Amino acid sequence: MGEKPGEPSYHIFDWCFSFDESNVVSPRQYLFFNRYEGGQYGGAGFFHALCLNKKFQQRFNERWDEFYTTVYPQWLEYFDEYAAKIEVTAYQNGQRWTADENSKQAGSSADFHKNAAEMRQWIIDRVEFINSDPQRGLFENEEVF
């Protein structure tokens, strides 16, 4: 499924946090591969042009810094609090709706601790990738920042 040996399988979260149709998405994957302007990913050209604007770059980086230093630590705390609140019901849900052939990629919420830990780590890895990448995780083959 596109996973590297030794990496957790992040595909348990369906259409968010790493699952794109049948592909597992690494937290270190760029949002856009290039400025391709056609087909299914036509918005990439628009975002590429937007990212070339110096005022946009400045504001983007200001907002990212605010997110990274203020919102992100609060979010991590909230994640832990919320996970504790839903633990019992997640387990009960997993007992009622076990993983079967149709949902094998989604897993079961009975594996709540494993799933929550993987999701939390995926977000941490994604945020750190964006924070350390000169292109802010947007364009793999284009320098826009």
Image (tube, grey):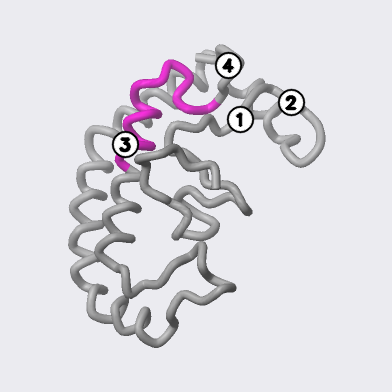
Task: Give percent across and percent down for residue 137.
Answer: 47, 27
Q: Secondary structure at mark 4?
A: loop
- To which quarter of the image does residue 64 belong? top left
User: What distance separates the C-alpha of mark 3 from that of mark 4?
Assistant: 21 Å
- Magenta stretch, residue numbers: 124-138
User: What distance separates the C-alpha of mark 4 from that of mark 1?
Assistant: 17 Å
Task: Give percent across and percent down for residue 1.
Answer: 55, 48
User: What distance separates the C-alpha of mark 2 from that of mark 1?
Assistant: 8 Å
Give yes or no for residue 135 being in the magenta stretch. yes
Query: To which residue does mark 1 refer?
Result: 32
Query: To which residue does mark 2 refer?
Result: 36
Residue farthest bottom in this picture: 96
Q: Amino acid at mark 3?
A: Phe
- Taking 122 as reference, is 88 left or right? left
Q: Residue at x 19, y 68 (%)?
A: 84
Q: Secondary structure at mark 2?
A: loop
Q: Residue at x 46, y 75 (%)?
A: 99
Task: Give percent across and percent down for residue 8.
Answer: 36, 47
Dot 2: within a 10 Å radius of its alpha carbon, few (fewer than 14), some, or many (20 or more) residues?
A: some
Mark 1 and mark 3 lie on one chain; the one further toward the N terminus is 1
Q: Is residue 129 above or below residue 9?
A: above
* Residue 15 numbered mark, or none: none
Q: Secondary structure at mark 1?
A: loop
Q: Nearer the viewer, mark 2 or mark 3?
A: 2
Dot 4: within a 10 Å radius of its alpha carbon, few (fewer than 14), some, or many (20 or more) residues?
A: few
Q: Nearer the viewer, mark 1 or mark 3?
A: 1
- To which quarter of the image does residue 130 belong? top left
Q: Amino acid at mark 2?
A: Tyr
* Residue 67 numbered mark, or none: 3
Query: To which residue does mark 4 refer?
Result: 53
Q: Amino acid at mark 1?
A: Phe
- Callout 2 touching callout 1 (CB < 8 Å): yes
